[in-house]
Image: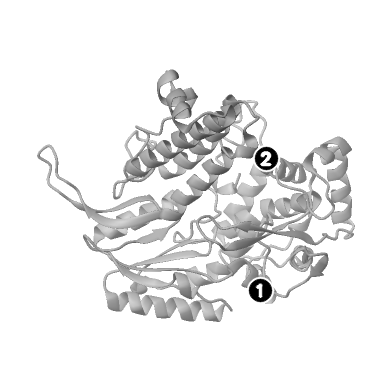
Amino acid sequence: MSAVSASPAAQGSGRGVPADPVRALQHALYRAAKADPGRRFHALYDKVSRSDVLWRAWVAVRSNNGAPGIDKITLAQVEEYGVTRLLGELASELREGRYRPLPARRVFIPKPGTAEQRPLSIPPVRDRVVQAAVKIVLEPVFEADFLPCSFGFRPQRSAHDALQVLIDECWRGRRWVVETDIASCFSAIPHEKLVQAVEERICDQSVLKLLRVMLRAGVMEDGHVRRPVTGTPQGGVISPVMCNVYLHRLDRAWEDSDGVLVRYADDLVVMCWSRSQAERALGRLTALLADLGLEPKAAKTRIVQLEEGGGGFDFLGFHHRLVRSRGLNGKKPVTFLARWPADKAMQHARDRLRELTRRSRSLLPVKWIVEDMNRFLRGWAAYFRFGNSAARFFKIRNYALMRLALFISKRLGRRRGFGWSVVTYQSPDQLGLVTLSGIVVDPRPFRDWRARPNAGGERRR
């Protein structure tokens, strides 16, 4: 957990509760960086090799349950070998300057809703632990500098926080939207410029050397190791933090007169008052990215006017569109920015449900299939429930029922109608398939999307 969320109570109340030394370290680093924006930290390397920091890094890596790297060593094999033993070896290598990371294993995963594939780099487990330890130490320093317009891969911030800004600014009247994302951002960041961005806060040469070694470790693809001079591999533990460190230069250079910037990693939206302002914002954005050696992705860059009956835009998995309420029960109709799962998100859900009920799984018990479907549906709905998503939830739930009925029919060699009868009539609870009704939370302008009470018991606004 980041230093930002580390409260004194979490570190020990002074009543015999032991403090969390790693969280205390992060909290101290954050406070020092926040108190002096010009300070450069010169004694951090010894913190990376601390046994408690490495252990916390292992816990983070283990909880992600990732795949092995090119050495083919799994998390289970590390536990069999001995976690304490491995961490001790890593600590010795780091202290003695002998640590050298292996190249990451390159795989390609499909982008939901498209035919494109996203390159993913999987470092070996031991290298992921070291990256996580570096992240634990460096993140609080840079978190003290990051600006409110940045939301991606930051502690105590989420996609829904970014989405709330869109609702608030649209309600204020900013209804011209510049939408874009950065072309191949993770693989295009120049190494030297990235290190220069890190050096604005870090002057510990051992830490900088370690970062350079990580960046130059390269990736193995088709049996060959490539060591490009750009990119922080997508899939590396340290990569999201490095991406934010580099793009902080964009955030810092942005001017409010060019519109309200909302950035989630490499996805960007600018909310503007007028078309002319939106055009200026797009030009300004393009110029700032060019200075960083980056460029907006042409296919995903456009200016959209939000108006009733007009089009909308997709951002962070949701489709956003200006609509007018019906004004039922004597209430005055209002115009607001609604959002619901985008078409790509819907297609991803259907693809996943179809995969879980494919014919090759027909020998598995129906109970297991339902459990797998429920696990996916709960996770998918947990994200999209914060939106005007009821109608689309209904469609996905019906599709899940249809796929389950089809699975039962194929499993028993019966007609499709038999499976539908089993699911909808013969089972009192539709075989335990989760229902998605009644869980949607409609967003409201200037109201915390979590509807969390603050210390005074009132809702945050």
**Contact (CB < 8 A) between labels 1 and 2?**
no
Which residue is most to the left?
330
Q: Visible in this render: residue 425? A: yes
Q: How many circles with numbers are drawn on the protein? A: 2
Q: Nearer the viewer, residue 370 or 255?
A: 370
Does 296 sit above or below residue 219?
below
Q: Nearer the viewer, residue 46 or 84?
A: 84
Residue lying at 48% horizontally and 42% vertically, measured from the top left: 380
Q: Quadrant of the N terminus?
A: top right
Does 224 sit above or below residue 460?
below
Structural crowding at the residue carrying mark 2, measured as other residues with C-alpha within 10 Å and reported as few (<14), some (14–19) or many (≥20) = few
Does 346 sit above or below residue 194?
above
Colour basis = one colour
Residue under circle 2?
A: 63
Q: Secondary structure at mark 1?
A: helix
Residue under circle 1?
A: 196
- Tag 1: amino acid: Gln
Residue lying at 45% horizontally and 76% vertically, measured from the top left: 285
Q: Visible in this render: residue 451? A: no
Residue lying at 64% horizontally and 38% vertically, measured from the top left: 360
Residue lying at 40% horizontally and 76% vertically, measured from the top left: 282
Q: Secondary structure at mark 2?
A: helix
- Tag 2: amino acid: Ser
Structural crowding at the residue carrying mark 1, measured as other residues with C-alpha within 10 Å and reported as few (<14), some (14–19) or many (≥20) = few
Q: Quadrant of residue 81?
A: top right
Nearer the observer: mark 1 or 2; the answer is 2
Q: Earlier in the sequence, mark 1 or mark 2?
A: 2
Does 229 sit above or below residue 218?
below
Mark pair 1, 2: CA separation: 32 Å
Residue 158 place in picture, x, y as percent:
48, 50
Residue 320 place in picture, x, y as percent:
34, 56
Give the side of residue 99 with respect to residue 204, left or right. right
